[in-house]
Image (cartoon, helix red, strand yellow):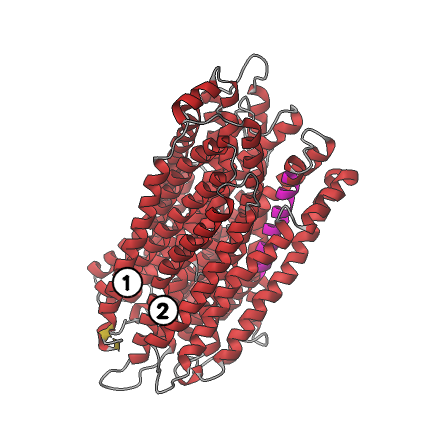
Amino acid sequence: MRPNKFSRALGALLMLAALATFVPVGAAYASEAELILPKLSSVDFLGVDGQTLLMAGIGVCLFGMLFGLVMYVRLRNLPVHAAMREISELIYETCKTYLITQARFIFMLEAAIAAVIIVYFGFLRGFDAVRVTIIVLFSVVGILGSMAVAWFGIRVNTFANSRSAFASLRGKPFPTYDIPLKAGMSIGMLLISTELLLMLAILIFIPGDYAGPCFIGFAIGESLGAAGLRIAGGIFTKIADIGSDLMKIVFKIKEDDARNPGVIADCVGDNAGDSVGPTADGFETYGVTGVALITFILLAVPAIGPENPHPIQVQLLVWIFLMRVMMVVTSAAAYWLNGAWARLRYAAATTMNFEAPLTSLVWVTSILSIGVTYVMSYLLIPELAGDTSLWWKLASIISCGTLAGAVIPELVKIFTSTHSGHVKEVVTASRQGGASLNILAGLTAGNFSVYWMSLAIVGLMGVAYGVSTAGLDTIMLAPAVFAFGLVAFGFLGMGPVTIAVDSYGPVTDNAQSVYELSTIETIPGISQEIQKDFGFTPDFAKAKGFLEENDGAGNTFKATAKPVLIGTAVVGAMTLIFSIIVVLTERLTVNVDKLSVLHPPFLLGLVTGGAIIYWFTGASIQAISTGAYRAVEFIKANIKLEGATKASIEDSKRVVAICTQYAQKGMANIFLVVFFSTLAFACLEPYFFIGYLISIAVVGLYQAIFMANAGGAWDNAKKLVEVDLKEKGTELHAATVVGDTVGDPFKDTSSVAMNPVIKFTTLFGLLAVELALEMERTTTALLAVLFLGTAFVFVWRSFYAMRIGAVRAD
């Protein structure tokens, strides 16, 4: 979208927002504007008041941040040859430019969000200017937090990729595993600690009557930042990946051939899509899930006495945040324990299964987290409202989610690992059936994965529901909803490790590319140089084998993290939806019958929500298809295979520019459809909107799992042919490359970007529906028509204005 058109769209929104400021206020409803945090110092825990105890939690967050920074320094100081460091620095500089470009774009979108916040809190709720400014500033803090962890992620990963590539030359597999994991833990620990530090700061230092709205502003900012970076990054990386991969078939060249100007863009995309996007998404996921539980506690747990009316609220809030603090501790402990075992077993080995120590890390963290959950729950909340059994019941509910965080990756590996029968089936089908049967076999794997993973999620949520029926109703409304929110919380119970194994993938992918792009094997006298400067003789054959095999492990564990974040998004969204329901039904006292398929607007909302998921899937793939077409067109016209050892930097930058251009166009269209659709349906009818949100969450869950695992199966089928079967350049390899190019937008764009879309829609919807409730019905009907009409314009643009034939090459 050209800037002038984008500016006009924002201008139209601001005019509508201004119009809304003159609308008469309707009936009063309880909302986030009225959420007041109780005094945390009013309840003691282990002889210490709640606020002081949470202050100690800030110390743990600082430890987690220090842990991440120490890892960062160690990675930076690892030995690396200049040829490899040069490539990784080029990747980093290009990534940094991309991130700055995206930051400018996201802050343009923030203008629209800020307008809605100002209208709602300032004009319709009557907050003073200082208070509204603070809420807007916290939305900016949320964006800056997402940006900061994304920048840290690309900096760490681009240190690690060249160091990992160089370490492989020693002829031992362990350093090739150890360095990417260090990078992942560095990102995971700093990300979780930063997010938790910011939320604790709001909880402790912001006055109670300001904190509720500030949490909402912070979460919306996080969600906006994650949506922009995840969607745009997903489009960018797959344009580059497809454009680069197809050259292997067209010109019969090797993967990551230095003469291919698309390879640098592919490396940048690995960071833009598989590092920047996931880190921002992870940052937002932890924040939004926390805000969902805070909102639930303040809305659903009633006051019980005049002197200290909210002791249970305080107990639950302090308990939840200290559980989050312990995530940092258990993840660090699990990393050290598992690292000692892995080093003992593999440090001197000449071969290793790269997936094995990653799997054990996930399970060690899960077991430690569950144990700590029970111990800390017993110590912190031995009694709630006179009931001495609720501590273990709440701990059991969280543990269902923590267990899911280990079980789901095991299920994912059944469908995506290089050792998986499903992946081998994709290869077998491709041998005789070519790309056609390759694609069908991948679709089959994706569909089967949805069945089994959905049953696992439903089973664990069912256990949580069963436990919630055993007394939680004495302290809150809708205890089952709280239980589901705690399951989402438990999903994230080993947060730094979940982020670490996800971040492992882009480092292993880039390490292989850096090796090839450095052309280190062709440097005259390189063996003698490395022996002299670094003290070992390089083994190039083993290095390439380790890097390719480890890339397969990285693909698998990237796949395992996706359903965890997707599941968290959906289950957390349900908790936020309940908060909207509490507002609409005045704490479940009126209009509860409208939350039924017998109420036509609610049923119509259920039907409508799924449409947005399928539109989003198509729109994101359309942006990739058009961008990839332009990238392939440029690369074919400019690639030089004769008399050249490397592509020119100018040609590589041009491919990056093409990827950035279409990523921004696609993201702008997608975000504005989601934004205006949310406003339109919130204004149309509140119970229609509830059905709409539920449908988006449920349909999005199935679609995302299907696409993520089908894409993972296609990806590792190609890796199996390249590494295990060693059949590069064959017809079988060509078929698996085609399948992988189909799977690329499935697994790394459309599926994963549903997380922030679901969360942003629900979180922003919480604000939008309350804004609508404050207006007269005639006004909301008019605004619904205007907003929906605007959304349709961008729906049209996302398809018809993005078609290959409709977009002129720049």
Residue type, numbered disc 1:
Gly
Residue 94 visible (yes or no): yes
Residue at figure coordinates x 50%, y 46% from the top left: 794
The image position of residue 391, as x and y in percent, is 40, 78
Q: Which residues are magenta?
A: 699-719
Residue type, numbered disc 2:
Ile
The image position of residue 506, as x and y in percent, is 49, 41
The image position of residue 565, as x and y in percent, is 49, 56
What is the quadrant of residue 783 in the picture? bottom left
Residue beneath label 1, please?
57
**Residue closest to the eye, 196 or 68:** 68
Q: Looking at the image, is mark 1 or mark 2 nearer the viewer?
A: 1
**Residue closest to the eye, 172 or 744:** 172
Magenta stretch prevailing secondary structure: helix
**Residue closest to the eye, 134 or 611:** 134
Q: In the structure shown, which secondary structural element does the residue marked by tag 1 occupy?
A: helix
Residue at figure coordinates x 53%, y 17% from the top left: 645
Q: In the structure shown, which secondary structural element does the residue marked by tag 2 occupy?
A: helix
In the rendered view, does 748 fall on the left or right side of 307? right
Picture disc at residue 320: 2
The image position of residue 223, as x and y in percent, is 40, 54
